Amino acid sequence: MIKQGEAQGKYPLLFSEGRLGNLQLKNRIGLAPMTRTSAESNGVPNETMTKYYTRYAEGGFALLITEGTYPDEKYSQGYLNQPGIANEAQIKGWKGVVERVHEAGAKIICQLMHAGALSQGNIYADETIGPSAVQPKGEQMAFYGGNGAFAVPKEMSQEDIKDIVRRFAQATRNAKEAGFDGVEIHGANGYILDQFLTDYTNQRRDEYGGRTENRVRLLVETAQACREAVGSDFLIGIRISQSKVNDYTHKWAGGEKDAEVIFTALRNAGLNFIHVTEHHADQPAFTEGGPTLASLAKKLSGLPVVVNGNLNTPEQGEAMLESGEVDVVTLGKSALANQDWVKRVAEGKPLEEFAPQRFFVPDAKVKAFEL
Ligand SMILES: Cc1cc2nc3c(=O)[nH]c(=O)nc-3n(C[C@H](O)[C@H](O)[C@H](O)COP(=O)(O)O)c2cc1C
């Protein structure tokens, strides 16, 4: 049996203090954002969620990134029972979560997610919006209570675009008011900002469509507006991916050239970090033997990088940190299976494998997961 301290000695970087912006982290291990559809139906975070997040804080994670949280009472909600951060009741609900997580010794940031054309459950709107009237690939997710094809979204006007930017900025203010240590703008996984970034969902002919430089514009403008809303001290990051929840194998058509345009554009957007997620974050992003997406993000943006994607073991996380390409490692499924992942590793205890059947309740209509 490895004793506490010995394991930490085995993974010196994982267990070393880190920093994102002005935020001091007690180690380099974070919880990846995971939708759990466990808020009240009006999007207010509740005691179940408070207990859920507090368990990760008690389990040793330095940084928790919340599940995708909708920023407005319009088109952004993606799933029924998803939490929001758009009104006073939701802000108050989050305050309860944040306080308890802080008491348990972790930092917590709010992931701001606008589902756009992938919205499949919204109490505020019957229609969806997107950069272009293109029906999303794939089918709605049954384990989040959806079924059948996605609706064809309404093409957004320039005014709609300005409105989204304003609403992300307001949600950032709300997150600050709730006591969060920062926000992560969800620019990944097929949701609205990624719909702008993606060639086939964005067929616009204005300055937000066409070349990659144009398709990344809304991500930059959103980040800048969030920064202006809260000043320089509040942590703001953005999450970027190639794959999407409804298009698992998508790769950027321009490969490394696209990475260059995207990460260079994000360099001067007022961000403190980029959170990169790939299926296997330690593998080349485009061609065999080539760089990982995380290393491209670091090199091209010059910003701290948070990395995610099948880095389930401490060896994998330590190796990513050793490469010097990343600053913090986040865990999704492995954290679900081990809410005390950090403590277990520190104490040399074995990790549980992720078993989907324990987390995805088969016939659930809305409450898809056991927390
Ligand atoms: C149940 C579940 C819900 C998820 N919800 C979100 C989400 O709300 N926002 C997000 O950016 N990613 C979400 N993801 C993706 C994870 O953050 C992560 O990128 C993915 O699980 C891969 O990392 P892993 O191999 O460590 O699990 C979710 C993943 C799972 C398993």
Image (cartoon, grey):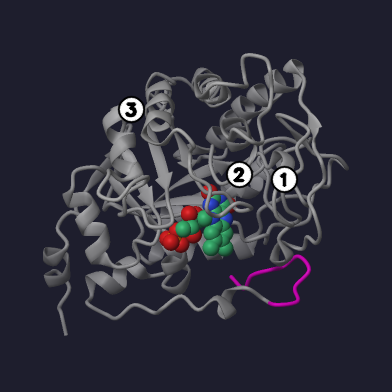
Sequence-wise, which precedes: disc 1 or disc 3?
1
Nearer to us in this view, 300 or 145: 300
Which portion, as a residue range, is magenta? 362-371
Would residue 282 be found to the left or right of residue 87 on screen?
Answer: left
Q: Quadrant of the N terminus?
A: bottom left
Is 195 located above or below residue 33 in the figure? above
Sequence-wise, which precedes: disc 1 or disc 2?
1
Return the mark for residue 264.
none
Q: Give the residue drawn at x 60%, y 61%.
A: 49
Q: Is residue 339 magenta?
A: no
Q: Give the image location of residue 163, x and y in percent.
A: 71, 22
Is 123 located above or below residue 232 in the figure? below
Q: What's the residue type where badge 3 is placed?
A: Ser
Circle 1 residue: 136
Quick one: which residue is furthest to the bottom in this view? 1
Is 312 located above or below residue 35 in the figure? below
Circle 2 residue: 190
Marks 2/3: CA distance? Answer: 22 Å
Is label 2 in a helix, a strand or a loop?
A: loop
Q: Give the residue drawn at x 62%, y 32%.
A: 171
Q: What's the residue type where badge 2 is placed?
A: Gly
Judge: label 1 CB < 8 Å from ligand 1: no
Q: Give the image location of residue 99, x and y in percent.
A: 50, 50
Mark closer to the observer (1, 2): 1
Q: Give the residue drawn at x 50%, y 20%.
A: 213
Q: Give the image location of residue 261, x and y in percent.
A: 41, 24
Circle 3 residue: 301
Sequence-wise, which precedes: disc 2 or disc 3?
2
Nearer to us in this view, 290 or 114: 290
Instruction: Please report contact status of discs 1 and 2: CB closer than 8 Å, yes or no.
Output: yes
Is label 1 in a helix, a strand or a loop?
A: loop
